[in-house]
Image (cartoon, rainbow, N blue to C red):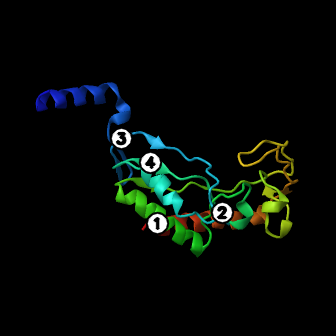
Amino acid sequence: MKESECADTQTQQQETMPLLTPYKMGRFNLSHRLVMPPLTRQRSWNNIPQPHAALYYSQRATKGGLIITEATVISEAARGYKDTPGIWSKEQVEAWKSIVDAVHAKGGIIFCQIWHVGRVSTYEYQPNGQAPISSTSNVLKPQLQTNADEPVKFSPPRRLSTDEIPQIVNEFRLAARNAMEAGK
């Protein structure tokens, strides 16, 4: 096939497949519109991403492609699943840096999905065995989770008071700042 025919074929494919066309997302120039969505991998240790995560994410990176990380907890009290990574401590930020560097080395773009699980937790995951915090005191029904052999019975949550909301907002702010630091 001649070079001009290849170019024509590529143009036709892009016209029929808009997912393959570039997209400007704020200051980011995506080479295509396929995005790797967040997945709950549960492969961290003590809420610290492990070195193998750099390989995992870099294998999925494409030049100008967007990856959204697995859900990453904003604070110790935001936990609710075994072996999920965090972004509240310096050690966690340092661990994320090698992952981000590996994706950037492939020309990829990576965003950190930050979260707080609210009432989807148990006393086991909470600091000092306290009740999980939530917008409600309603208990969730037991659910089968990924790294569990039987349904998880969630602990009764404590309804967050209005004056505690700024603390949670600040935890999200700090987690976002930490994620940006990890991405430098």
- Mark 3 vs mark 4, foreground winner is 4
Q: Which residue is mark 4?
A: 60
> Please, what is the three-letter code of the amino acid marked with disc 3?
His
- Precedes in sequence: disc 3 or disc 2: 3
C-alpha gap between disc 1 and disc 2 = 27 Å
Label 2 belongs to which residue? 169
Quick one: SS at disc 1?
helix
Q: Residue 15 location in percent, x, y?
A: 29, 27
Q: Residue at x 62, y 56 (%)?
A: 43
Is there a contact, CB below 8 Å, between mark 3 and mark 2? Answer: no
Report the disc number at residue 32.
3
Single out the mark in the foreground, 1 or 3.
1
Q: Is 100 located above or below residue 152 in the figure?
A: below
Circle 4 residues within 10 Å: few <14, some 14–19, many ≥20: some
Which sits earlier in the primary sequence, circle 2 or circle 4? 4
Quadrant for the N terminus, please.
top left
Amino acid type indicated by mark 2: Val
Q: Earlier in the sequence, mark 1 or mark 2?
A: 1
Mark 3–mark 2 Cα distance, whole angstroms, equals 33 Å
Q: Give the Cα separation between the discs numbered 2 and 4.
A: 32 Å
Residue 103 showing in the rendered view: yes
Residue at x-position 85% and y-position 55%: 157
Q: Nearer the viewer, mark 1 or mark 2?
A: 1
Report the number of discs: 4
Where residue 166 appears, as percent x and y from the top left, is: 69, 65
Is the Cβ of the residue at disc 4 closer than 8 Å to that at disc 1? no
Quadrant (top left/top right/bottom left/bottom right) for the C terminus: bottom left
Q: Amino acid at mark 1?
A: Ser
C-alpha separation, residue under disc 1 versus residue under disc 3: 24 Å
Above or below — where is 13 with respect to 59? Answer: above
Q: Is residue 109 above or below residue 174?
A: above
Q: Looking at the image, which residue is at 82% across and 44% down?
A: 150
